[in-house]
Amino acid sequence: MGYAKQTLDKEGQINAQALWKYMTIENPYQNYPTWPDKEGFYESTMPPGNILKLYVNKIALDTIVNKKGTFLDGSLLIKENYTDDKKLFLITVMYKARGFNPAGHDWYWVKYKPDGEARLEGKVDACIDCHVGVAGNDYVFTGSIK
């Protein structure tokens, strides 16, 4: 389970604050690669932000580059959401955790404020309801993984 263990609380549940610590202190996500062809700022047509930066860990990048069709356990997609004047206002995360929510392709969702406060986490209906339209692409809008 390797990577995933670092995001679990004492009861073995995914913990938003442990995930935040992992992706900002232990293994800073700003050092991760970006989604191919989405380097730097880019405009989005989807909520919650108009201007984005999207980082992916190596597990997720392998899925994207090699068109594996489904992200593997431990995949991490981190989207920085900016205002039109490029002020960071939200960090949204999709973390793939085997067995977490099979009906939702095992994605764990988190919306963080820039200071790390988790506003929403877990099986977030608003996230799932929006992303279900791309369930055939493992709930990801950014680009085809097949």
Image (cartoon, rainbow, N blue to C red):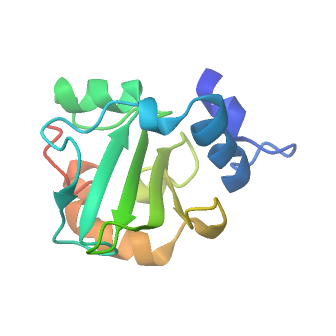
> Relative to 137, does residue 123 appear above or below in the rendering?
below
Residue shown at 22% from the left, 68% from the top: 133
Residue 119 rendering spot, x and y as whole percentages:
61, 73
Placement of the C terminus among the 4 image quadrants: top left
Q: Residue furthest front?
A: 85
- Residue 77: image location, x then y, percent: 39, 45
Is the residue 34 above or below the residue 133 in the image? above
Residue at 32%, 30% (x, y): give it: 33
Residue 49 percent location from the top left of the image: 31, 72
- Residue found at x 21% / y 61%: 134
Residue 110 visible in image: yes
| Above or below 58: residue 78 | below
Q: Is residue 11 left or right of residue 57?
A: right
Q: Is residue 1 visible?
A: no
106 to the left or right of 35: right
Q: Quick one: 25 or 135, which is closer to the camera?
A: 25
